[in-house]
Amino acid sequence: MFTVVICSRDEHRFRNAAEMYRRLLADKTVEVIRVADARSLAEGYNRALSHSHGELLIFSHDDLKILAPDFAGRLESYLDRFDVVGVAGTTRLVHPRL
């Protein structure tokens, strides 16, 4: 089971991010936790962690777009080899790469 934690004060941005993760992880069990009143990202993520049920955790901003249609498979493949996976983004990406 995946738990996606999104710190977001904006309902529209949260809804878009949650829908994106549900679509990308459609064949997985997904729990989405919103923290709307975080004092900081770290505080919000830590607070949500204590309420999560997933074995695999995704801590996410509310303004990202994942372009890789095979995101779930890639993520699981990386998590088979590594304990922690970090993702860096850009506003100039044309298409996803490995």
Image (spheres, rainbow, N blue to C red):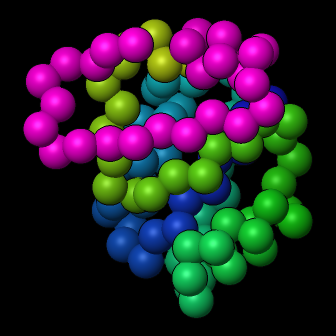
- In percent of the image, x 53 and y 68: which residue is there? 7
First to last magenta residue range = 73-98
Counting labels gives 0
Q: Is residue 77 above or below residue 39?
A: above
- Residue 59, image x and y in percent? 61, 52
- Residue 23, image x and y in percent? 47, 26
- In percent of the image, x 46 and y 10: which residue is there? 70
**37 or 19: nearer the eye?**
37
The quarter of the displayed image where residue 48 is located: bottom right
- Residue 67, image x and y in percent? 30, 25
- In percent of the image, x 65 and y 18: which residue is there? 78
The quarter of the displayed image where residue 3 is located: top right
Residue 70 located left or right of residue 81: left
Q: Is residue 62 above or below residue 85?
A: below
- In percent of the image, x 32 and y 55: which residue is there? 63
**Is residue 79 inside the magenta stretch?**
yes
Q: Quadrant of the C terminus?
A: top left
* Majority secondary structure in the magenta region: loop
Question: Residue most toward the bottom?
Answer: 39
Q: Is residue 77 above or below residue 83?
A: above
**Is residue 31 inside the magenta stretch?**
no
Can the viewer see residue 19 in this picture?
A: no
**42 or 8: nearer the eye?**
42
- Residue 84, image x and y in percent? 71, 37
Q: Quadrant of the N terminus?
A: top right
The quarter of the displayed image where residue 92 is located: top left
Can the viewer see residue 53 in this picture?
A: yes
**27 or 2: nearer the eye?**
2
Residue 58 located left or right of residue 74: right
